């Protein structure tokens, strides 16, 4: 058990009025030691909350009075106070095994914790799930949850997870669905392993055995040059096209049987296959937008709405309690920085930094963005040499590659726009700070949301 520390006290909040300070260690809530921010949030819902805290080695009780259900106004140092349930699978396709050595320690932590699935949309395999976990999820209605399925054939799934429990742990998925917990599934598609006929079987059995699944996202295997699995290969245009045919077939079967498509392919599969993206209606509610499914289509939709003078409601962030000031967002939800670097000039275009897949998206819409921004724009596609392999998404850009691209970029530029998905917590995955990156150029670097509104706001500053 690691007691959380208060990182921030919101001004004029109930916690501020009670005298709580950053650095205070939270010990108990109403005499109970909470195991996580979920339990903490339930305990602080009352009008009067008794907090046990430690400050500079001395313990004290602090009474906080507030309206029932109102947040205390604290940001805590962690969301799991006891111990994160780590993953005991050894999936050959796991990207953590494909990281180079020497990166920051937190990047090597594999979790398989249903609480992080609920809070942040992390995917869990359920191989460490228990009866007590099921009882808590059902009793406290902890949904939506996100479950990695990969294959329904027990032998194939156990082999993919390299864990014998992988063949039986989907029984927990059935239990969750039987209790009407909202669950979204994922299939990481590995050519020659769970693609083709195995994918056909998986989609068929999901439709029969797990029809209550809210969605199933199907994403391609990501391969880094640091991986050691020689049996894994990336999708080619032909294998991606063949798997998309299977996905679309089962979309139609699900639509006929359930009134919804259920199965959704990632944007990356369409890009690799050279296909046009599906229409907006085919993504339905964009349930797995953050999983790279429908991101490009929703961007195109936002652009069209912006051109028509309308503001579009964007797909929501997965996970619950994301707006409650209690625990910091983790991973890609960490606080992201804004503008860094030198003072902008009006000379030259605004340059959009993106990955190779993002550059393909901008190819056909850059003139439309320029008309809206009323200024010239240019795209700087950054090749991911750090990870190599088939890694080409903007969210996995690293500081060293972006710095090299900036040094090589001799064309005119007034400023650079960097998507905030690449810099959770203000740092790239290779631990390069955005502020340090700014030293590579005399032009400012603005960190923006990867939306039409975010890009236009950055371009029009």
Image (cartoon, rainbow, N blue to C red):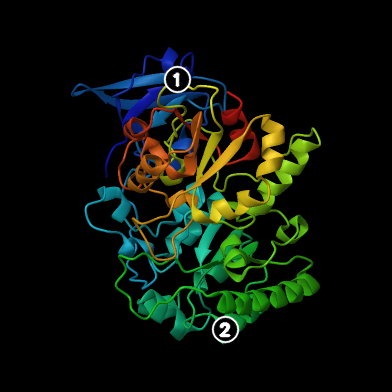
Rendered position, 357 above or below 239 = above
Rendered position, 387 above or below 369 = below
Residue marked by disc 1 = 343
Residue marked by disc 2 = 196
- The residue lying at 56 percent from left, 30 percent from top is 458
Judged from the image, the secondary structure of the residue bearing numbered disc 1 is loop
Foreground: 195 or 347?
347
Q: Where is residue 307 drawn, in percent x and y? A: 77, 37
**Disc 2 and disc 1: Cα gap in Å?**
53 Å
Q: Where is residue 417 drawn, in percent x and y? A: 51, 35
- The residue lying at 55 percent from left, 37 percent from top is 449
Judged from the image, the secondary structure of the residue bearing numbered disc 2 is helix
- The residue lying at 46 percent from left, 15 percent from top is 11
Residue 210 placement, left or right of 333: right
Residue 99 placement, left or right of 257: left
- The residue lying at 49 percent from left, 61 percent from top is 134
Q: Where is residue 32 drawn, in percent x and y? A: 36, 37
């Amino acid at each position: 058990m690691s007691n959380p520390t208060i990182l921030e006290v919101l001004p004029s909040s109930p916690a501020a009025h009670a005298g709580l300070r950053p650095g205070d260690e939270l010990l108990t809530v109403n005499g109970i030691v909470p195991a996580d921010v979920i339990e903490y949030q339930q305990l602080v819902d009352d009008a009067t909350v008794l907090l046990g805290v430690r400050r500079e080695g001395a313990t004290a009780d602090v009474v906080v009075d507030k309206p029932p259900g109102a947040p205390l106004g604290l940001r805590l140092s962690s969301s799991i106070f006891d111990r994160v349930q780590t993953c005991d699978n050894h999936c050959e396709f796991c990207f953590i095994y494909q990281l180079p050595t020497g990166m920051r320690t937190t990047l090597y932590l594999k979790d398989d914790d249903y609480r992080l699935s609920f809070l942040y949309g992390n995917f869990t395999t359920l191989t460490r799930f228990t009866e007590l976990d099921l009882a808590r999820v059902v009793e406290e209605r902890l949904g939506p949850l996100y479950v990695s399925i990969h294959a329904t054939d027990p032998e194939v799934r156990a082999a993919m997870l390299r864990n014998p429990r992988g063949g039986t742990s989907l029984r927990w998925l059935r239990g969750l669905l039987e209790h009407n917990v909202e669950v979204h599934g994922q299939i990481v598609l590995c050519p020659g392993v769970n693609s083709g006929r195995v994918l056909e079987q998986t989609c068929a059995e999901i439709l029969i055995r797990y029809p209550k699944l809210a969605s199933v996202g199907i994403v391609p295997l990501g391969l880094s040059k640091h991986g050691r699995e020689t049996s894994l290969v990336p999708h080619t245009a032909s294998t991606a096209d063949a798997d998309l045919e299977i996905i679309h077939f089962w979309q139609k079967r699900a639509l006929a049987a359930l009134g919804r498509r259920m199965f959704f392919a990632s944007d990356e599969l369409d890009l690799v296959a050279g296909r046009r993206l599906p229409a907006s209606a085919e993504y339905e509610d964009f349930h797995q937008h953050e999983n790279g499914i429908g991101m490009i289509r929703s961007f195109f939709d936002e652009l069209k709405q912006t051109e028509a003078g309308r503001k579009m409601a964007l797909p929501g962030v997965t996970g619950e309690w994301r707006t409650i000031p209690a625990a910091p967002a983790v991973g890609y939800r960490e606080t992201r920085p804004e503008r860094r670097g030198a003072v902008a000039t009006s000379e030259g275009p605004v340059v959009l930094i993106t990955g190779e897949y993002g550059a393909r998206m901008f190819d056909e819409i850059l003139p439309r963005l320029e008309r809206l921004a009323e200024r010239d724009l240019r795209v700087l596609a950054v090749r991911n040499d750090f990870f190599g392999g088939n890694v080409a998404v903007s969210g996995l850009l690293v500081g060293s590659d972006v710095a090299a691209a900036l040094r090589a970029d001799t064309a005119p530029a007034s400023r650079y726009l960097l998507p905030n998905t690449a810099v959770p917590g203000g740092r790239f995955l290779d631990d390069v700070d955005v502020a340090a990156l700014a030293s590579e150029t005399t032009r400012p670097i603005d960190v923006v949301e990867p939306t039409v509104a975010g890009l236009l706001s950055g371009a029009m500053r």
